[in-house]
Amino acid sequence: MEEVRLMKGNEAIAHAAIRYGCDGYFGYPITPQSEVLETLEALMPWETTGMTVLQAESEVAAINMVYGGAATGKAVMTSSSSPGVSLKQEGISYIAASSLPALILNVMRGGPGLGTIQPSQADYFQAVKGGGHGDYHMIVLAPSTVQEMADFVGLGFDLAFKYRNPVLILADGIVGQMMEKVVLPPARPRRTQQQIEEQCPWAATGRHGRAHRNVVTSLELDPAKMELNNERFQRTYAAIEASEVRFAEHYTEDAEYLIVAFGSVARICLKAIEEARGQGVKVGLLRPITLWPFPKAEIDRLSKQVKGILTVELNAGQMIEDVRLASQCRVPVAHFGRMGGIVPNPGEVLTALFNHFPEAKQ
Amino acid sequence: MKPEEIIDPANRVYARPRLLTEVNTHYCPGCSHGVVHRIIAELLDEMGLEDRAVGVAPVGCAVFAYNYIDVDWVEAAHGRAPAVATALSRLSPENLVFTYQGDGDLAAIGTAETIHAANRGENIAIIFINNAIYGMTGGQMAPTTLIGQRTATTPYGRRVDLNGHPLNITNLLAQLPGTCYVTRQSVHTAPAVRKAKNAIKKAFENAMAKKGTSVVEIVSTCNSGWKMTPAQANEWMATHMTEHYPLGDLKNE
Amino acid sequence: MKEEIIIAGFGGQGVLSMGKILAYAGLMNDLEVTWMPSYGPEQRGGTANVTVILSDTPISSPVLDTYDTAVILNQQSLDKFESKVKPGGTLLYDPSGIHHKPTRTDIHVVEVPAMDAMLEMNNSKTYNMILLGALLAKRSVVPLEAVLRGLKKTLPERHHHLLPLNEQALRKGMSLV
């Protein structure tokens, strides 16, 4: 049954995981996302759905537990925040290279290094351009509301299994820590062992009469074969890019200027845009929901319509590179960002817009 | 007995185990891995575990274990086999989950995962091949390399002041309440092979009976890395290795 | 209807939980709500604040430049937020923690002697409910009845015996302004 609740984004992740039939969660405490593990431990899903919850000895162990769980065809996940996600990168590369479905949550905090615990979006490059070694991609979802935190757990698992590829929910401290109304989805049961074996004939479930053994590995010492593996990965990425681009738009129909922002920052920008519209300035918002695959075609299209683009990010300017590529530098693309855990308010965004594009005010 | 009589199938008392695949291993002649692989393949067959066994392969010489033993396998990142096995076992408790790890994998890069999986008492069997050297990467020092032992990275012998002490991780694991069976065996003689087989059998039984973590260390040889003939290596192992890593049960509950 | 509220004071004064109960009351009243805390070590003894937005339309930014209403419990927070109350907005403050009173004349400044009232009630746990009562009296963003239902929802079952005390504190706060 659906249920309307008031909760933090991190809590919503935990509730949604249970309701979406997640089989296992493995994590290590780190601010600002520890509520995910805390909530799961408090809800004791092993007593109800049979979901496994385990506090691992490190982020490294946690991601490798996810690798092991995913190798059995189960729906498994982990969560962490920036420094912890850095530790997970090796495991993520292995998961991608072994074509395993898995869900990872990063509630970003200010870096680099140990940094702060306040909100940040400085892990954009890490999320969409690798992070770990080798040519691989994760599908990267950027929630901007607590509702999307909950919804993307289900969407994330669906995409992960559809493409046998890891999915990252790239959130920030704001979405993780704030409370909003959230409609929790009706509970769907965990898949049975038979369903798992039908859906995942590749999984290391134990042979159970299967004529051949299943081996989950990313090792292939023959470069000719490894190149074929890479070509297979690239075909998967091409299929994802063709079908899974997601974005939201506000006030773009007649926009003369465009703001591109993701996650909670997009909401700050929306308020700034509403203020600008009140002053008669035609600004629109494009919010990429999938950061990879990136909404290149839509930005390309809008760049033919607007006079300038401003990207707003909680970093020194990372997504702006993709916006510039997608818009083919047809119009000026400027960046406004705060770093280290500082969050701009709508007024600062508006000021930045007018600073970069003074002609917008006329 | 003439060679023709020996190869006569009627006289054959020794065959390839059913679950050892028809693939030539990449191991060096004289290596202990082949013997341990054979023991595992025999046991999985004899114990009727072929359909329920999932092995976790390490990084190191045994990285291709999954090519040789005909059950499901998951290849783990270097040192992470116990973490991977934790999830495999917790999510599929009906299966036999075992790791097969070398000294670098288990006792250097993966020490944290090893100790914590054992401390949680995960219902897994850990097969630990200790040959005191990094075989696959070309004979560098392992955490278990003996004092004075020459390797590619301790060309004048391991020194305590430079390289620290050999890590006796099996003794350490025996201290943990999560382990139910910790033993040190070898496979350098026929009687030793029989004892090692019994030990691994017990470890598999414990895992299936959910008794906690079992650790079977096999004090092994690496004649290539040690720069010896297989016979010399066996002898060196028996005299030097077992001095620091004495054979026998450390814990049997 | 849209009300953008900042509640600010010291960690431990019940700032976050006051905001939470207000947000729950909004939820009970079918409003869209956002509760955005300052989080981290500052919760433990330093300054703490929470932004609560109640609206009958979808809420965009959880981060704000200005507020309709500010509830201020110490000098640092007054210094930080007095200028951020919208003209015509409301600033409630407890004078017990304030050395320099608010000076703005284009907003409704309301003195709430909540600390004195709390001492009168002889229960330190009632402090934030007294303030919430005062807020409700000045800005009827949600009915008292919704707050009581919100309280019931946020308080664990084992603390339900405290509900009458909280209602008393809310009514006390309403009577102060």
Image (cartoon, helix red, strand yellow):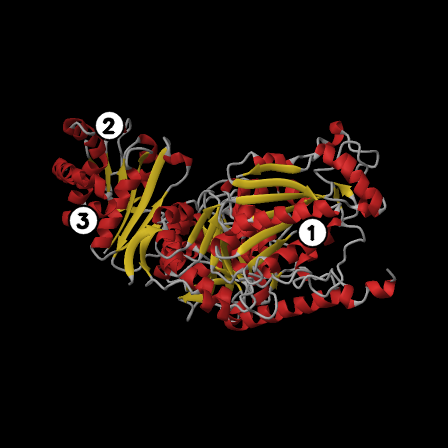
Q: Which residue is mark 3?
A: C149
Query: Residue B56: x percent and y percent?
Result: 61, 54
Q: Quadrant of the N terminus of chain A?
A: bottom left
Image: A240 above or below C103:
below
Query: Residue C66: x percent and y percent?
Result: 33, 47
Secondary element at tag 2: helix
Q: CA distance from mark 1 to mark 2?
A: 77 Å
Residue furthest right in the image:
B2
Residue plotted at (52% across, 42% down): A57
Dot 3 and dot 1 residues touching (CB under 8 Å): no
Query: Callout 2: residue from which chain?
Result: C
Q: Quadrant of residue B220?
A: top right
Query: Callout 3: residue from which chain?
Result: C
Report the side of C36 relative to C131 (left or right).
right
The kind of residue on which mark 1 rests is Val
Query: Residue A80: x percent and y percent?
Result: 49, 48
Whether residue A30 is visible, yes or no, is: yes
The image's mark for residue B36 is: 1
The kind of residue on which mark 2 rests is Ser
10 Å crowding of disc 2: few (<14), some (14-19), many (20+): some
10 Å crowding of disc 3: few (<14), some (14-19), many (20+): some
Whether residue A107 is visible, yes or no, is: no
